[in-house]
Amino acid sequence: MTQTFPYNRVAVTGGAGFLGSYVVEGLRARGCTEIFVPRRADYDLVESSAVKKLYDDARPDLVIHLAAVVGGIGANEGNPGRYFYENLMMGVQLIEEARRRDLKKFVAVGTICSYPKFAPVPFREDDLWNGYPEETNAPYGLAKKMMLVQSQAYRQQYNLNSIFLLPVNLYGPRDNFDLETSHVIPALIRKCVEARRSGADHILCWGTGNATREFLHAADCAEGILLAAERYDAPEPVNLGAGFEISIRDLAEKIRWLTGFEGQLVWDRSKPDGQPRRSLDTTRAIERFGFHASIGFDEGLKQTIDWYENTFC
């Protein structure tokens, strides 16, 4: 059913990407027709001139900032400087230009990587500053967390309505399945499907399998972002999650079974596990703007596997 969305002109950075495609669909479902999606070829948001051009061309009431330079553990290890600089500069300049132009609202979408390495589980927003992030993705996580600092400072000094959201690990159809840069779910799906099709007797998995993660379907995450855009106007950061925890070993077994791969999972313990545990307390999102994840994990995995096989196989 078409809903009345409180903003007429919306710019979605990263709107052509994985999560962004779901956010744009959600905006259209809410009756929003003036949606501006900048492409990197035309708007390199690391550059201040491109940020100004975006605001000139889009003339937005609302900016949803999803754009990020991001990847899995290996990509983070190989690009710490780039991931820090480019993510930091995009966020800083977009928020600065928002306050200069009296933007009605800015939605800054951060990352679970901003949490301390040994934050108590489930992660609560109040623990966000109680330690340093996990080393392999700390530069990326800290760069994104600076948007929280800036949002709160600009709200205090300039009365800019900027909010900060912390989604847990995402997955779903349209994800990135490039093994050089993908996250764990698409990487495991691709490895299992390719091994099944080739008749291989095993796949190689990174780490020990003992680390835990929580996963949120991108369509659910998009709904959480849009609910926050509609209903939430406060300085405190808010987690977006599904409220469960699974070990990478159990995840790999689940994907092995769902893809029909009958070979073995071999764990390369020379590779890093990343953060030991990740799971979110989602109470604040429920209380502040009524967000609950609705897509079951097995259902979402089946959707993702089917999409991959129909698209690439």
Image (cartoon, rainbow, N blue to C red):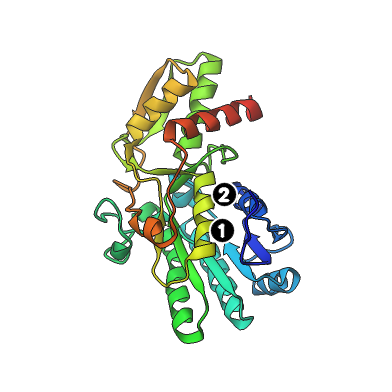
In the rendered structure, the answer to whether residue 120 lies left or right of residue 53 reads left
Q: Tell me where residue 301 appears, x and y as whole percent.
A: 48, 32
Quick one: 113 or 238, which is closer to the camera? 238
Residue at 58% over, 63% down = 64
Quick one: 42 or 33, which is closer to the camera? 33
Placement of 167 over or under 60, stated as above or below: above
* Residue 257 visible within the image: yes
In the rendered structure, the answer to whether residue 137 lies left or right of residue 211 reads right
**SS category of the residue bearing label 1:** loop
Residue at 70% over, 69% down = 54
In the rendered structure, the answer to whether residue 106 lies left or right of residue 261 reads right
**SS category of the residue bearing label 2:** helix
The image quadrant of residue 285 is bottom left
Q: Tell me where residue 298 appears, x and y as whole percent.
A: 44, 30
Within 10 Å of disc 1 (Cα), the crowding (few <14, some 14-19, many 20+) is many
The image quadrant of residue 130 is bottom left
The Cα atoms of the two marked residues, 1 and 2, are separated by 8 Å
Residue at 31% over, 67% down = 129
Q: Which residue is mark 2?
A: 19
Amino acid type assigned to the residue bearing label 1 in the image: Leu
Amino acid type assigned to the residue bearing label 2 in the image: Leu
The image quadrant of residue 34 is bottom right
The C terminus - image quarter: top right
Q: Tell me where residue 35 appears, x and y as whole percent.
A: 70, 60
Mark 1 and 2 residues: CB-CB less than 8 Å, in contact?
yes
Q: Tell me where residue 204 appears, x and y as whole percent.
A: 42, 28
Within 10 Å of disc 2 (Cα), the crowding (few <14, some 14-19, many 20+) is many
Q: Which residue is mark 1?
A: 66
Task: Please report whichever mark, 1 or 2, sits nearer to the chain's N-terminal start.
Answer: 2
